[in-house]
């Protein structure tokens, strides 16, 4: 069950374990939560939809016992539909698929909810916000990529801020989270929040300096 605090209003910090020490993933998850992380973000890449390979359902299952907040699984894979059940069964609380990777997006989102998970949709920088306008009543989260997906440590694309603003306007009073992922750091986080984001995914900005630095790194991302 997702803790109520993870779903409470306010800006959430979701460290991406793509930047964690892979040899100590369970310990890293506990460390970022103890340091103040609101969610745990898991970037799944297939080497096909994006040029990198990362985690699969077995890794999600292995770290699930260490997650006490919300496990946020971002599927950068194509096709995604054949693997939705495996990630849900592995313990994902929220599953996000890419609009570009699903020819039947509405069906994919319905399938995620039918599996008992929150449903998210992600947009790469080249995809306009209109791609998800027709599924606004099907989603719990919209993720705007502020880098081209595939690798951590890339520079923030300020060109995506107008997309965030437009989506925030469309969301209105719907209970939809607006997430941003890519190049999020203390200097860019306030820009994202000003544009309407309320979930900030950060990798290197959180994990830099090792466990002793995590609390300070997370605190630095929270808007004043």
Image: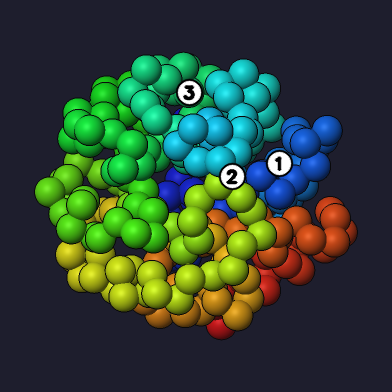
**Local secondary structure at mark 2:** strand
* Callout 1 crowding tier (Cα within 10 Å): few <14, some 14–19, many ≥20: many
* Callout 3 crowding tier (Cα within 10 Å): few <14, some 14–19, many ≥20: many
In the figure, residue 65 lies in which quadrant? top right
Residue labelled with disc 3: 87
Question: In the image, is residue 22 above or below residue 169?
Answer: above
* Callout 2 crowding tier (Cα within 10 Å): few <14, some 14–19, many ≥20: many
Answer whether residue 14 is visible to the viewer in this image.
Answer: yes
Measuring from the top left, give residue 155's x and y in whole percent. Answer: 59, 68
Residue labelled with disc 2: 40
Q: Are marks 3 and 2 in contact (CB under 8 Å)?
A: no
Question: In the image, is residue 119 above or below residue 200?
Answer: above
Give the residue at the far left of this rendering: 134
Q: Which numbered disc, 3 or 1, marks the residue that appears first in the sequence?
A: 1
Query: Which residue is at 34% across, 59% downward?
Result: 126
Residue labelled with disc 1: 29
């Amino acid at each position: 069950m997702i803790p109520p605090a993870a779903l409470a209003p306010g800006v959430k910090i979701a460290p991406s374990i793509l930047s964690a020490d892979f040899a100590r993933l369970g310990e890293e998850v506990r460390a970022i939560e103890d340091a103040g992380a609101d969610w745990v973000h898991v970037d799944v890449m297939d080497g096909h939809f994006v040029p990198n390979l990362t985690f699969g359902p077995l890794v999600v299952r292995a770290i699930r016992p260490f997650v006490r907040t919300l496990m946020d699984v971002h599927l950068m894979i194509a096709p995604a539909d054949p693997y939705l059940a495996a990630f849900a069964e592995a313990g994902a609380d929220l599953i996000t698929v890419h609009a570009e990777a699903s020819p039947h997006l509405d069906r994919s989102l319905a399938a995620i909810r039918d599996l008992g998970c929150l449903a998210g949709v992600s947009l790469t920088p080249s995809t306009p916000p209109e791609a998800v306008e027709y599924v606004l009543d099907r989603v719990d989260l919209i993720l705007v990529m502020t880098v081209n997906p595939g690798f951590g440590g890339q520079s923030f694309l300020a060109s995506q801020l107008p997309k965030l603003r437009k989506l925030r306007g469309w969301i209105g009073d719907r209970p939809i989270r607006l997430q941003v992922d890519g190049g999020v750091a203390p200097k860019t986080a306030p820009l994202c929040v000003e544009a309407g984001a309320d979930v900030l995914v950060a990798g290197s900005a959180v994990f830099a300096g090792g466990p002793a630095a995590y609390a300070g790194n997370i605190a630095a991302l929270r808007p004043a």
